[in-house]
């Protein structure tokens, strides 16, 4: 998922997407442990996507906190 796609999501959609991606990552890890994946790069890509989404959510939260301080 690209950053411009992530920034286009609302806060609620972003939280839901993070939950879905975490579940998908857990399933990938399980499948990798049992049978191995054709491309272990999928694990790294999911982790990075989740990190991007969490970074955007955190930035939004910090921006809201700064607005309330001012």
Image (tube, rainbow, N blue to C red):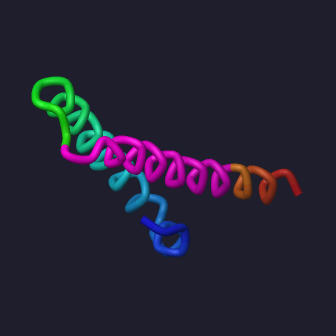
Instruction: From the viewer's side, name the closer residue of 56 and 24.
Output: 24
Image position of 20 (left or right of 48)? left
* Residue lying furthest top: 33
Q: Main secondary structure of the magenta part?
A: helix
* Residue lying furthest front: 38
Q: Residue at x 41, y 43 (%)?
A: 44
Indicate yes or no whether the magenta region holds residue 47. Answer: yes
* Residue lying furthest left: 35
Indicate yes or no whether the magenta region holds residue 30. Answer: no
Quarter of the picture containing the N terminus is bottom left
Q: Residue at x 67, y 54 (%)?
A: 59
Image position of 11 (left or right of 41)? right
Image position of 32 (left or right of 43)? left
Q: Position of residue 70 (x, y in %)?
A: 89, 57
* Residue lying furthest right: 70
Residue stretch in magenta: 38-61
Q: Position of residue 33 (x, y in %)?
A: 19, 24
Above or below, comparing residue 19 to residue 68 in the picture: above
Q: Residue at x 43, y 58 (%)?
A: 14
Q: Residue at x 29, y 40 (%)?
A: 25
Instruction: From the viewer's side, name the closer residue of 53 and 37.
Output: 37
- Residue 37 placement: quadrant: top left
Q: Position of residue 58 (x, y in %)?
A: 62, 48
- Number of labelled discs? 0
Instruction: From the viewer's side, name the closer residue of 48 and 10.
Output: 48
Image position of 47 (left or right of 16)? right
Q: Position of residue 27 (x, y in %)?
A: 19, 36
- Residue 12 placement: quadrant: bottom left
């Amino acid at each position: 998922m690209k950053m411009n796609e992530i920034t286009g999501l609302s806060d609620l959609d972003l939280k839901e997407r993070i939950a879905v991606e975490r579940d998908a990552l857990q399933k990938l890890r399980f499948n990798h442990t049992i049978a191995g994946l054709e491309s272990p790069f999928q694990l790294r890509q999911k982790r990075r996507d989740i990190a991007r989404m969490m970074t955007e959510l955190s930035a939004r939260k910090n921006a809201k906190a700064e607005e309330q301080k001012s």
